[in-house]
Image: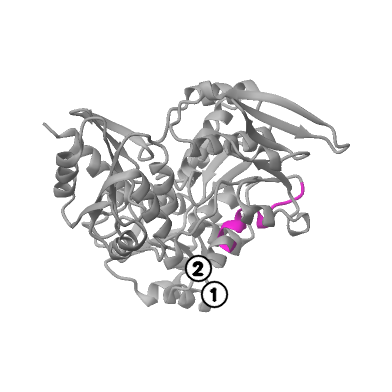
Amino acid sequence: MHLQGKRALVMGLGVHGGGVGVARFLALQGAEVTVTDLRTADDLRASIEALAGLPIRFVLGEHREADFRQAEIVVRNPAAPPTSQYLQIARAAGAVVEMEMTLFFRFCPGPILGVTGTKGKTTTTLLLGAMLREQFPDTVIAGNLRISALDQLPLIGIATPVVLELSSFVLEGLGEAGLSPKIACMTTIAPDHLDRHGTMEAYIQAKEQIWRHQHPGDAVVLNADAPVMRTMAVVEQRPGDVVWFAGPDGAHRLEGKRAAFWRGNELIWQDCANDGSATHAVICTRDDVRLPGGHNLANIAAATAAACAFGVAPERIRRAVQTFSGVEHRLEFVREHNGVRYINDTAATAPEAAIAALRTFDAPIVLIAGGADKNLPFDALAREIAQRARAVILLQGTATPALQDALRITGAGVVAFGPFDDFEQALDTARRIAAPGDIVLLSPGCASFGMFRNEFHRGETFRRIVQSFP
């Protein structure tokens, strides 16, 4: 793809760095770059400042049809739906529609390992990156992590492994372009983003794009504990090899398969030859694991399966497991105050993730939940709250009434406070009702929009308020 002199339009600058990376990359490639975003210059100040000195034209607070008609290349933000009327205008005028990640796949010279899933994908991505860095120190980690992949291109050579976290929104674009990573890993599948995808079937189809366009010799890592993934693994559906992983209760499903799984206290890598013979290597034991929560044992197995499929030695994987202590905003210990532990799990933006967080702790829990709607059911989360939380603090948001209804019907008996439209007031209430030995857990099970810019802003605000307690 030649970009010199092309009229390029970046649709959605954003605040996470992806749009900034796209605009910078296009400008440095010699394209004539226009950035358009519905947000104002004040909202995007940090992103605009990051592009200072580059020959970029900004159209902010609106989209103009003329800009889309004149563009030869449009790079859309993942948040912009592919059905947008502006993208239709651009396509009708002959423009090529790309995303940051499709550009990255086209220009990246090194092998790409991609991770997706409803929950666990960030932890698995970073842990897989740590495993690879033990053997390949120049490994690059990027994607849906507030790290622009295109900004990393100068660091990548033909033998440099690249580990990417890929959301369903990004995978839509990769599917349209017919692009998949060499090693694809799917952690879990549960209802999420149904406000965007409409149905569970469409959401699964978006996730499947991570392996749909692989080539012979590539590999996909699937969760043997997930029935929907076992259905995916029909050999005729995909050209790549299937590698499996399972949590502590799934080893019985993996006889005769290439797989990473827990057997008792040990994580095993089972490698199978074409003649049916198998070799086994002990990767690590549970005593080596620093990550909290039983669900993270499955994440460790997922990362191990992908690393082994790529050729990382068991002792390198073990060293990474022994030193990996967790991820920001995911079951992150913030502080102990008056005998109460405060845990930031703001990245739990779906009910399934909040359920996993609730199951991590044995202590009484004061849960902070609620937020913006993604058209997801809350029945299972309400039952889990009733069983494991002694109180729930509700945050104002479009999804919160549905969570309240579910608590009344299936979670009867749990004490609920709120909903609060003031986060500081909500945390003050949690602080007052929590007793020594309790855990105050921010694991909302909902998106953050409305009260916060995004889930990271929510987690950072939680940390700031908790650290300010006298």
The answer to which quarter of the image holds residue 377 is bottom left
Residue 155 seen in this snapshot: no
Query: In front: 208, or 129?
Result: 208
Amino acid type at image mark 2: Glu
Q: Secondary structure at mark 2?
A: loop
Instruction: Give the image location of residue 16, x and y in percent.
Output: 36, 49
Of the image marks 1 and 2, the number of the one nearer the N terminus? 2
Q: Which residue is mark 1?
A: 94
Q: Is residue 214 magenta?
A: yes
Front in this rendered view, residue 383 or 381: 383
- Residue 237 lies, in percent from the top left, at 74, 59
User: 10 Å neighbourhood of mark 2: few (<14), some, or many (≥20)?
Assistant: some
Quarter of the figure that contains the C terminus: top left
- Position of 242 compared to 461: left or right? right
Is residue 272 found left or right of 100 in the rendered image?
right
* Residue 5 percent location from the top left of the image: 49, 60
Q: Residue at x 30, y 37 (%)?
A: 364
From what the image shows, is residue 234 above or below residue 184?
A: below
Up/down of 355 relative to 71, above or below = above
Snapshot colouring: one colour
Residue at the spot 46% in from the left edge and 77% down from the top edge: 89
At x 30%, y 48%, the residue is 52
Does the segment drawn in magenta span residue 309? no
